[in-house]
Image (cartoon, rainbow, N blue to C red):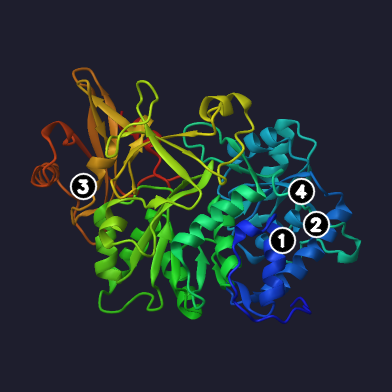
Amino acid sequence: MVSCPMTGTGSTPIDPRTCTTFWELLSRRAELSGDRPALIDESDRSFTFGEWVVWSERVAAGLMRLGIGPGTRVSWQLPTRIETAVLMLALARLGAVQNPVIHLYREREVAALVRQTEAEWLIVLGSWRGFDYEAMATKVLAQTGSAAQLLDLDDGLGDGLPEGDPATLPPPPADGTTVRWIYSTSGTTSEPKGVRHTDQTLLFGGWGSVATLDPAPSDVTSMGYPIAHIGGPLQLIISLSRALPMVLIEAFVPELALEVFRRHGVTMAGGSTAFYLAFLNEQRKDPSTPILSSLRMLLGGGAPKPPDLYWQVQRELDVRIQHGYGMTECPMMANGDARDTDEQLANSDGAPVPGCEIRICSGADGLPVATEVVGEIQVRGPMLSKGYLDAELTRESFLADGWFRTGDVGCLRPDGHVVLTGRTKDMIIRKGENIAAREVEDVLQTHPKVGAVAVIGLADAERGERVCAVVETRPGSDPMSFLEMQEHCREAGLMAQKIPEQLEIIDALPRNPTLKIRKDELRARYG
């Protein structure tokens, strides 16, 4: 255990917008709440906020001794562990430029990011869960011709983190507007794109989560998804701003994660729609016994949330989903608010978070459209990234007046809430008529035999595209038949042109490392 002189036990809220840097937020929290638990893992190790800051400074000194300092470009590929959170803040203490790489990425994605970021260091585990990360990293550096130095933290990670004397450290960075974070898009159809963030864009994004989720002092948060995802720093900010303990899970296996969550009384869990479904499936194994009696909220984003899924969760888990809308380029745009009605939480993706502007523009002339008219979603605000590493991509998506073209399609309701209907690339054009895949998916998700569903367009000589539904059967159910699907869609009032003309039953829908459904794979498989 790291010794720590800080003895504050308060939970005084900190508005992350009042902090210049990520390191300042951690330092202020340690001063106020040094003795409060901060980081807990599945082995029940626990570190306080004070221990977190002291350990991070020791690691920062060790990294500096290796030659890592302000502006040094560091890519790291590590799982969701306490040590990873320590390393993140150590790099932030130094003012290094860090590129978190999701641990599920493999050679193609890692090579693309090492090349794009011009990484000077690549930090990995030797091996983890049967995969040799050191061997892959060595191969990537050779293939790309990178001169980056490889730091292998071995499977123990805690033993591998370098440490030094914090007294040797220079003052922490005081500028929060310098790009020091390179996050990456999921890269489902092409290599991942490097997205440039500052401490300030992340802190404002995190504030959007805090302001809408409104955590209580007694809450216990959790992170069961990759900490290298853009949601990672947002979850850290939620914990730091409200002095909440956070339970970290290396790899989300529902029954194992729930066992850990029960031991530590987790009240806030989730990550995305896939996590909501996983919790539901666990509850359905024994409806008479709550899977997590302390749970009071599911939160997440990154994928569509069918309205019926909200009602299923409320009915069977007795909690509400506060789903959000964000992306790597703009980590928090809209979110379900603690004060929202059930109708708003079920049928929208929340209202714009504080500081974020959202407008809907027509595809034809790019001009803003009226309320309830579907168009392209554009956003701007202090949480918006500073563009891509690729200047051409930045020019295509970041407009001169500060607006960002998300590539998503949706509308604004009269109450100001956002409704996503899909991606611009996810529209199915059947006989000249636009069909939103999201609309059909929401209908099919209400069928009792459907566990998860993806609706795609497939090339068709007669129609241009035909509507195809790919269904993952709900555990314990028989597969849905084609006739059952058609009848369900008709009963739901779906117009005939939108009813899928093809049904495919699949054991498990393919997903990328952030659990988004790989529709490109489905189109290739069934097209």
Q: Residue at x 75, y 31 (%)?
A: 145
Instruction: Tell me how far mark 4 sits from mark 2, CA to CA.
Output: 11 Å
What kind of residue is marked 2? Answer: Pro
Residue 24 numbered mark, or none? 1
Q: Earlier in the sequence, mark 1 or mark 2?
A: 1
Question: Mark 1 and 2 residues: CB-CB less than 8 Å, in contact?
Answer: yes
Q: Quadrant of the N terminus?
A: bottom right
Q: Nearer the viewer, mark 4 or mark 1?
A: 1
Identify residue for label 3: 444
Q: Residue at x 34, y 59 (%)?
A: 277
* In the image: residue 470, left or right of residue 145: left
Q: Position of residue 339 (x, y in %)?
A: 36, 64
Residue 172 numbered mark, or none? 2
Q: Earlier in the sequence, mark 4 or mark 1?
A: 1
Instruction: Tell me how far mark 3 sits from mark 4, CA to CA.
Output: 47 Å
What kind of residue is marked 3? Answer: Leu
Depth check: 412 or 480 in front? 412
Instruction: Tell me how far mark 3 sits from mark 1, CA to CA.
Output: 47 Å
Q: Earlier in the sequence, mark 2 or mark 3?
A: 2
Q: Is residue 194 visible?
A: yes
Q: Nearer the viewer, mark 3 or mark 4?
A: 4
